Image (tube, rainbow, N blue to C red):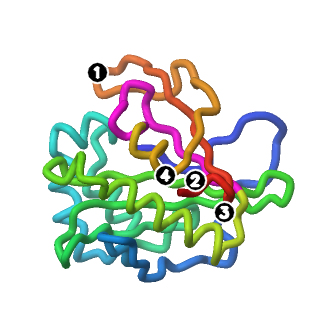
Amino acid sequence: RRRHGRDGGRARPRRQLAAAVTAPRLRGERVTLRPLDPADVPRLAEIAAEPEVAHWWLGLSEEDLVELAGPEEETVPFVVELDGETIGLAQVGEETDPDYRHANVDLFLMSARHGQGLGADTVRTLARWLFEERDHHRITIDPAVANERAIRSYESVGFKRVGVMRQYERGTAGDWHDGLLLDLLREDLR
């Protein structure tokens, strides 16, 4: 899909993770988030290829997943598990410039697990870690405007709509579609 680290506005240093962060093991109410291992790539590639997932993740390839499993400097990848079963991928990026400091998150879950509150549990678990352990005050997420199910899930965690980013991302058919920027402040987390 896309890499975290898109910039607009004045020039500033490239976004990086502070001090090469390694994904910790995190427990949500139902999900467990753990570091991505190269052995996870085939299963995650299968999930990413599911039509309901690939539609939003724009053909995430096995090569992309291998890169994420390596020493990636811009994101921290997590495997999302439910009762020991791999059900998806989540990733975190951080802006470390003190004038713009915040984090961003993104995720996908296998289509058979959509609509069960697991996306919200995943995002809430990441948000707690980012607020409590990484000391962020703000987190962003930017789904496609048409991805209403994901938007409802993020809003259930406390994310607020900031605005529509017009013709933000190219779709699988090559056409441009709008994205919705949402953010979450520490005090908004539910």
Residue at 58%, 25% in the rendered image: 165
Q: Position of residue 133 (x, y in %)?
A: 63, 77
The reply to whether callout 1 and callout 3 are in contact (CB within 8 Å) is no
Q: Which mark is residue 187?
A: none
The reply to whether callout 4 and callout 1 are in contact (CB within 8 Å) is no
Q: Of helix, strand and loop, which one carries label 3?
A: loop
Q: Identify the residue under disc 3.
A: 16
Q: Which mark is residue 173?
A: 1
Report, in whole angstroms, how far the alpha carbon at label 2 lies from the one at label 4. Answer: 14 Å
Report, in whole angstroms, how far the alpha carbon at label 1 lies from the one at label 3. Answer: 31 Å
Q: Are there few (<14), some (14-19), or many (20+) residues within 10 Å of tag 1?
A: few
Q: Of helix, strand and loop, which one carries label 2?
A: strand
In the figure, is residue 109 to the left or right of 190?
left
Disc nearest the viewer among 4 and 1: 4
Report, in whole angstroms, how far the alpha carbon at label 1 lies from the one at label 2. Answer: 26 Å
Q: Position of residue 177 (x, y in %)?
A: 44, 21
What's the magenta region?
138-151
User: Three-letter amino acid code at disc 4?
Assistant: Val
Q: Are there few (<14), some (14-19), or many (20+) residues within 10 Å of tag 2?
A: many
User: Three-letter amino acid code at disc 1?
Assistant: Ala
Report, in whole angstroms, how far the alpha carbon at label 3 lies from the one at label 4. Answer: 26 Å
Q: Identify the residue under disc 2.
A: 104
Residue at 80%, 58% in the rendered image: 97
In this orientation, does residue 8 appear?
yes
